């Protein structure tokens, strides 16, 4: 009886194995079927089709804006220029409907908005896409194209009639990305007018980054006493998309001799009766004087010397020369020097702009007149050469004592005119 | 004593048979799971996506415009070769919207109305062919229709 039971148990193991195998077989096949069906659903290229349509609509809008903006700035009326752009968009819609006819495509285009204003050329439109084959209903997409031109600064030299304009140009990023600077403008991309007179010859300086450019030219109109203001218009055509954008600004050029000091050289000078050294466009009279940077215990000596706000825009020379008359004295060590760090820059309501920084070693001088002059030359970064009206120049002098203690004397006025030559007089 | 020993051997044989049964079931199921048909389905999906991606890249790069303006198929052929794997055959046909806006005209590129690295028979014989098409608005305001057909070498 026992033997019979044991025999049956062995068959039972095989029977269970068969059942498990059949179960696993059916389970694997079921999972496989489910995944296959899911893959079949994803075979429908909805994303790709929608992306293809919207990308091309963006190209269409870009081209339409190029047509409208160019015609408008050539003098065609706004309505007529706009009609040309609308014509292209209508043609595009009918072409796409025909191309994707087999998909049951339907496109509803919203109203197209155009902005051709000072500093901006923009088009904006909405598209509602339905693709019957894929069950896509009224997918609404907003697309546009925009180019922005901003005149940052205009500097005019009345004597030479030289005009220097700094401007910045941006365009909207593709597929909704952030605005991007346009780095490849050429002289052929620009048209400049001064009081409606076209500037025939101008020089576009090399690209200085962040969409910023500097253009220089001689004014086509003479600055006589009657001219108190001029209107400058820049029309830029983007090299990639041929979209035209215009920016204009009115600049006052009234001649007021009393405020037009010669700022070509800034001298270290004493401010009226106060014990403060300033940067002044006028030398410190005939007197030799010296100042000593204040010193806190255990720290370097430091003095910040500032000018008043500039009364007009200044175009700095490509290289600035700083001449400082300095002396190291009252030393306690036998052999010591002072490491003097000089930093020069300017600031205004848009921020601080560093022109340059450098170091000089000033040795201890025994007896005699403090006639040692030290020179530094800074190359001015191209993008900060135009110093806007109202900016304040700042010279920072820091002294580090090496191998002893002493005092740094900075001389100015008379025969020791410490100074900074910032531009050349014409 | 002898009976007990035989009984143990029989148990081992039963267990081995059971394990073999389960193994066979797994093998059969997995062989059906990875059948060639499903590979083909996946192949088509991959090629389809690849075709759309390639067309999108061509449109964004401006190669189409250069090729059409210069009438050179070599520019497009080079671009396609660099964007596609080496074992993929392609056929790109470009149509231009006619001036009346009523139909499409094939664009002649280097003497042929298409750019391809294989004869038409390759696509006819291939068991799996993927295709994608887009419209392209050029910088001179013309509208084109691009149709790209892809197949992988060896799928017959």
Image (cartoon, rainbow, N blue to C red):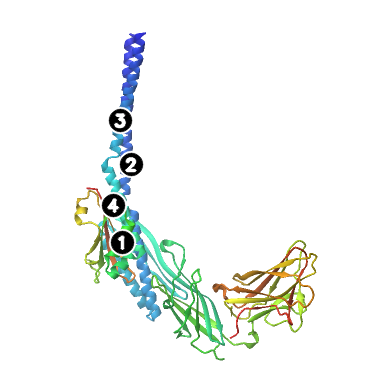
* Mark pair 2, 3: CA separation: 20 Å
Front residue of B37 and A315: A315
- Front label number (2 vs 1): 1
Do circles 1 and 3 both sit on a common chain?
yes
Of residues A5 and A402, the one nearer the viewer is A402
Disc 4 secondary structure class: loop
Residue beneath the point at 28% across and 33% down: B28
Check whether the beta carbons of the residues at disc 2 and disc 4 lie within 8 A of each other. Answer: no
Q: Nearer the viewer, mark 2 or mark 3?
A: 3
Q: Position of residue A21 (x, y in %)?
A: 32, 28
Front tag of 1 and 3: 1
Q: Position of residue B113 (x, y in %)?
A: 22, 64
Q: Report the residue marked by disc 1.
A: B78
Horizontal side, residue B155 vs residue A247: left or right: left
Q: Secondary structure at mark 2?
A: helix
Distance of label 3 from label 4 (alpha carbons): 36 Å
Between A1 and A128, the one nearer to me in the picture: A1
In the drawing, does residue B25 fall left or right of residue A404? left
Residue denoted by label 3: B25
Q: Which mark is residue B104?
A: none
Residue A35, which numbered label?
A: 2
- Chain holding disc 2: A
CB within 8 Å, label 2 to label 3: no
Q: Quadrant of residue B103?
A: bottom left
Q: Which mark is residue B87?
A: 4
| Disc 2 crowd, CA 10 A, few/some/many (<14, 14-19, 20+) | few
Q: Nearer the viewer, mark 3 or mark 4?
A: 4
- Same chain for marks 4 and 1? yes
Q: Using residue A80 as the reference point, say whether residue A294 is left or right of it.
A: right
Q: Is residue A380 visible?
A: yes
Residue B51, horizontal then vertical, whole percent: 30, 55
Local SS, label 3: helix
């Amino acid at each position: 009886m026992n033997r019979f039971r044991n025999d049956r148990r062995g068959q039972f193991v095989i029977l269970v194995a068969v059942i498990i195998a059949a179960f696993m077989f059916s389970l694997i096949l079921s999972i496989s079927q489910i995944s296959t069906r899911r893959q079949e659903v994803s075979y429908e290229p909805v994303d790709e089709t929608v992306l293809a349509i919207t990308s091309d609509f963006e190209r269409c809008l870009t081209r339409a804006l190029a047509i409208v903006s160019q015609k408008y700035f050539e003098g065609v009326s706004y309505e007529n220029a706009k009609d040309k752009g609308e014509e292209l968009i209508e043609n595009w819609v009918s072409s796409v409907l025909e191309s994707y006819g087999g998909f049951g495509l339907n496109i509803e285009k919203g109203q197209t908005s155009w902005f051709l204003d000072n500093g901006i050329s923009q088009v904006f439109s909405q598209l509602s896409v339905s693709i019957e084959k894929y069950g896509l209903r009224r997918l609404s997409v907003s697309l546009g194209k925009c180019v922005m031109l901003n005149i940052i600064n205009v500097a005019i030299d009345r004597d030479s009639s030289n005009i220097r304009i700094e401007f910045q140009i941006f365009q909207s990023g593709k597929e909704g990305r952030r605005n991007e600077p346009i780095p490849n403008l050429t002289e052929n991309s620009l048209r400049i007018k001064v009081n409606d007179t076209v500037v025939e010859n101008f020089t576009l300086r090399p690209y200085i980054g962040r969409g910023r450019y500097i253009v220089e030219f001689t004014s086509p109109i003479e600055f006589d006493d009657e001219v108190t203001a001029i209107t400058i218009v820049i029309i830029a055509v983007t090299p990639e998309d041929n979209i035209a954008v215009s920016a204009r600004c009115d600049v006052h050029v009234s001649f007021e001799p009393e405020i037009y000091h010669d700022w070509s050289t800034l001298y270290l000078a004493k401010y009226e009766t106060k014990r403060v050294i300033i940067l002044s466009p006028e030398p410190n009279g005939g007197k030799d004087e010296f100042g000593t940077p204040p010193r806190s215990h255990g720290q370097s000596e430091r003095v910040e010397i500032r000018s008043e706000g500039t009364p007009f825009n200044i175009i700095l020379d490509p290289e600035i020369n700083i001449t400082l008359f300095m002396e190291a004295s009252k030393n306690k060590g036998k052999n010591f020097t002072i490491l003097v760090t000089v930093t020069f820059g300017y600031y205004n309501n848009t921020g601080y702009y560093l022109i340059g920084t450098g170091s000089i070693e000033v040795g201890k001088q025994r007896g005699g007149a403090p006639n040692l002059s030290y020179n530094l030359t800074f190359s001015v970064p191209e993008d900060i050469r135009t110093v806007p009206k109202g900016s304040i120049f700042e010279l920072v002098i820091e002294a580090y004592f090496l191998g002893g203690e002493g005092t740094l004397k900075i001389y100015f006025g008379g025969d020791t005119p410490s100074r900074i030559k910032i531009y050349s007089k014409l | 004593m002898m009976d007990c020993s035989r009984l143990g051997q029989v148990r081992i044989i039963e267990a081995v048979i059971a394990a073999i049964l389960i193994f066979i079931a797994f093998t059969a199921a997995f062989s059906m799971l990875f059948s060639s048909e499903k590979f083909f389905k996946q192949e088509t999906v991959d090629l389809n996506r690849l075709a759309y991606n390639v067309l999108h890249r061509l449109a964004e790069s401006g190669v189409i415009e250069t090729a059409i303006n210069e009438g050179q198929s070599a520019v497009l052929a080079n671009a396609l070769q660099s964007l596609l794997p080496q074992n993929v055959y392609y056929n790109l046909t470009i149509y231009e919207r006619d001036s009346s806006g009523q139909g499409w005209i094939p664009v002649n590129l280097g003497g042929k109305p298409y750019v391809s690295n294989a004869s038409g028979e390759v696509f006819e014989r291939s068991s799996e062919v993927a295709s994608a098409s887009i419209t392209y608005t050029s910088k001179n305001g013309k509208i084109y229709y691009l149709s790209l057909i892809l197949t992988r070498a060896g799928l017959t």
